[in-house]
Image (cartoon, rainbow, N blue to C red):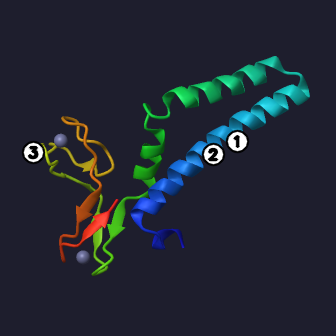
Amino acid sequence: MFSSWNIKTRRQMISFLYHLAVLMFSFFGIEVGFALGSNGLINLSACLFAFHLLTFRVIPISRWIQEQLIQEAVCYACGQEVELVNQYRCSCGYISPRERHVFSPCPICGKCFSWIVCPVCETSILI
Ligand SMILES: [Zn+2]
Ligand SMILES: [Zn+2]
């Protein structure tokens, strides 16, 4: 069922689950800390929560998970499998010397791809 969703939905789902997991973990830790009277656990969970709030836009852990879980796209129109790790060319003209995942922003201009084009039928695939 998971694989029949389009890439964009899967990515949103993964980042949603990731944030939910971190938040649940922090709150659960705080609850358990209070129940056990453990200040160490409360502080640790509160730190995790604060760390998450401060860094979730900066540290791309959820993008990293997306890149690990989603390695190829399937074209809606013709069913062709498209590798997402490739030497993609950014609209600024930059082509990375190494293969990169299409979810990663361009190292030069920072722009992210919002779609890729099927090499067989040229349909745009939202990512
Ligand atoms: Zn670029
Ligand atoms: Zn296609």
- When the figure is inspected, residue 109 is found, relative to residue 63, above or below; the finding is above
Residue under circle 1?
Answer: 24
Residue under circle 2?
Answer: 20
| Sequence-earlier tag: 2 or 3 | 2
Label 3: state its secondary structure. loop
Residue type beneath disc 3: Gly
Label 1: state its secondary structure. helix
Residue 7 image offset from top left, x and y in percent: 40, 63
Q: Quadrant of ligand 1?
A: top left
Q: Residue at x 47, y 73 (%)?
A: 4
Query: In which quarter of the view is residue 19 placed?
Result: top right
Residue placed furthest toward the bottom: 78
- When the figure is inspected, residue 33 is found, relative to residue 87, above or below; the finding is above
**For residue 24, side relative to residue 88 (left or right):** right
Mark 3 lies within 8 Å of ligand 1 (Cβ measured)? yes
- When the figure is inspected, residue 107 is found, relative to residue 10, above or below; the finding is above
Residue 29 image offset from top left, x and y in percent: 76, 32
